[in-house]
């Protein structure tokens, strides 16, 4: 079953096309990441899927409905963590979470949600006194309080310290393990690699690669770089499959204490993908 | 599987959603209580100034019978229109509304909640101001309170609709400027401190403040009924601006 299906999505702002024909398919229960530099169209795409923005063209189905016309019953099945909800409200954290919880029939207990995002010490603080990272964590809390079946996370960990990011990753894994479909946009490649079942790289409004983190952009078949030191000299060979070479080295009784085998990292692949489309 | 992380999506009944939003609006209003008290400063000044001294010419012999209902109407406009427009304009620019837009709360739901919350606040303010009026010698006809409340609800809806429409179309600074300007113009031309320009029935349709004030005078001060033209005027204002706001309102 598909949670999200997008065909030929287009969107322009004042004549400038920022989304130029995107096709996407996200299965139920999947964690899908949209990667891309600033201005690639990630947020616009996400906001169209959330029903926040109108599209200029293409077909979109989210949980079986068209976000452009779906009503509040449909919206209640989504959890949305906006990128720029810079809310300076005079409510406290617990009041805001409790307020949103009141919109849903079977919400997570507000105190539990606050604990899950690590904000318990700040529960009684006014929202405008929170730091940027703490506000993001509140956004995440508000996104999950209604137990959504589809969760949108638009750059959720911006401003998180490493510990908060780990806590967030654990939370996302737990949500995914129990069946929540998640669409994540992120700048952080290690985040996409750690969380996503599949990902798509967006550059200049188009998808330039799509696949599992391990296979993205031909990464799995990109071969490996084998290096070792022989008689004090650094030797490096680029091979499609390192196995025969290493076997040969072992057979020749070469000293392999300095052997390294490296494949292109997700970052290498990503940079070469978006570099080619600038 | 039904662990703590399992999805259980759905929307609470729209009534609970809106009730929750009204509670939030009232909490936020209480948090800026100083602003609410300050907003009563001008009406109070007008009440005591124009009601008890001869600084302005008012029609009739009973100054308080003319001035107090006008001050009540002015307060309704100040809170439902000026205050509402400014607060909502800034909420929009701060992203508060965008967050609500991501929730199951609908546009009409939010507009209703904002109007209901502002009506609650207005009732409190009117009780205080009417109390001051009574203390200085205003003698209202309590039996005429129902039609007076009726026109007040219509006026509140009309002002609130216009406020939310403006807050949607203009930047917050422009909203603040325009809302303040309209307040001052209405205060001058609306027949509060002195008689409004005599435009007859037509005046009631262009100056909702004058229409509302006159309706409160006819009922509370003189024990009469609300002229049909005023019902019509305020109902038209309410329907037009609430509909426009529901269509044009933007979350961000």
Image (tube, rainbow, N blue to C red):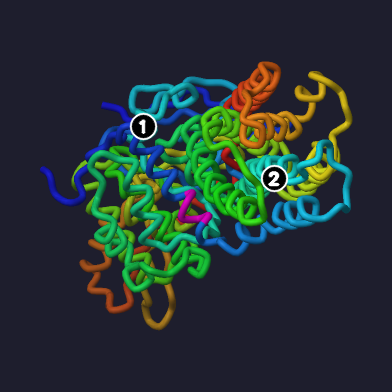
* Separation of marks 1 and 2 at Cα, in angstroms: 39 Å
Circle on res. B14: 1
Mark in front: 1 vs 2: 2
- Main SS, magenta region, reads helix
Question: Quadrant location of residue A18?
Answer: top right
Residue B59 locus on image (x, y percent): 84, 36
- Output the chain of dot 1: B
For the point 69% across and 22% down, the residue is B230
For the point 50% across and 34% down, the residue is B112
Numbered range of the magenta stretch: B25-29
- Upstream in sequence: badge 1 or badge 2: 1
**B7 in relation to A126, above or below:** above
B28 or A93, which lies in front? B28
Horizontal side of residue A52 vs B244, given as left or right: left
B78 or A99, which lies in front? B78
Q: Residue furthest bottom?
A: A232
Question: Quadrant location of residue B67?
Answer: top right
Residue B201 locus on image (x, y percent): 79, 19
């Amino acid at each position: 079953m598909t949670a999200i299906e997008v065909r030929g999505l287009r969107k322009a702002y004042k004549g400038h096309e920022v989304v130029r024909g995107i096709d996407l398919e996200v299965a139920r229960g999947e964690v899908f990441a949209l990667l891309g530099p600033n201005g690639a169209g990630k947020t616009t795409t996400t906001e169209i899927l959330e029903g926040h923005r109108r599209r200029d063209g293409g077909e979109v189905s989210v949980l079986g409905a068209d976000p452009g016309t779906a009503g509040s019953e449909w919206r209640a099945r989504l959890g949305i963590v906006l990128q720029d909800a810079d809310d300076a409200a005079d409510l406290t954290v617990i009041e805001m979470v409790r307020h949103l919880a009141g919109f849903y029939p079977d919400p997570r207990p507000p105190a539990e949600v606050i604990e899950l995002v690590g904000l318990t010490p700040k529960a009684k603080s006014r929202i405008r006194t929170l730091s940027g990272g703490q506000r993001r964590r509140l956004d995440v809390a508000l996104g999950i309080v209604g137990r959504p079946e589809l969760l949108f996370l638009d750059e959720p960990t911006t401003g998180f310290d490493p510990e908060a990011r780990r806590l967030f990753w654990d939370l996302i894994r737990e949500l995914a393990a129990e069946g929540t479909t998640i669409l994540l946009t992120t700048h952080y490649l290690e985040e996409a690699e750690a969380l996503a079942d599949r990902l798509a790289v967006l550059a200049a409004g188009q998808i330039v690669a799509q696949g599992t983190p391990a296979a993205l952009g031909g990464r799995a078949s990109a071969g490996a770089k084998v290096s070792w030191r022989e008689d004090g000299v650094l030797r490096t060979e680029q091979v499609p499959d390192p196995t025969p070479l290493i076997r040969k080295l072992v057979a020749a009784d070469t000293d392999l204490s300095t052997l390294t085998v490296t494949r292109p990292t997700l970052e290498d692949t990503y940079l070469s993908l978006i570099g080619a489309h600038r | 599987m039904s662990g703590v992380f399992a999805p259980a999506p759905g929307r609470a009944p729209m009534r609970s959603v809106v009730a929750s939003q009204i509670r939030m609006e009232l909490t936020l209003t209480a948090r800026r209580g100083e602003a609410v008290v300050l907003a009563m400063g001008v009406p109070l000044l007008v009440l005591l100034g124009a009601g008890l001294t001869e600084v302005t010419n008012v029609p009739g012999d009973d100054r308080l019978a003319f001035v107090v209902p006008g001050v009540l109407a002015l307060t309704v406009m100040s809170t439902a229109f000026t205050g509402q427009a400014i607060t909502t304009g800034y909420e929009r620019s701060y992203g508060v509304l965008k967050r609500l837009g991501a929730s199951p709360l609908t546009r009409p739901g939010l507009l209703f909640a904002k109007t209901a919350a502002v009506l609650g606040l207005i009732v409190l303010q009117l009780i205080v101001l009417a109390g001051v009026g009574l203390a200085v010698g205003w003698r209202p006809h309590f039996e005429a309170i129902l039609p007076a409340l009726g026109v007040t609800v219509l006026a509140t809806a009309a002002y609130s609709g216009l406020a939310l429409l403006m807050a949607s179309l203009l930047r917050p600074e422009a909203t603040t400027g325009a809302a303040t300007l309209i307040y001052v113009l209405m205060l001058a031309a609306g027949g509060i401190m002195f008689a409004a320009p005599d435009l007859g029935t037509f005046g009631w349709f262009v100056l909702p403040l004058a229409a509302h004030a006159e309706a409160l005078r006819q009922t509370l001060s003189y024990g009469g009924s609300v002229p049909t033209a005023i019902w019509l005027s305020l109902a038209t204002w309410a329907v037009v601006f609430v509909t426009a706001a529901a269509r044009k309102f933007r979350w961000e």
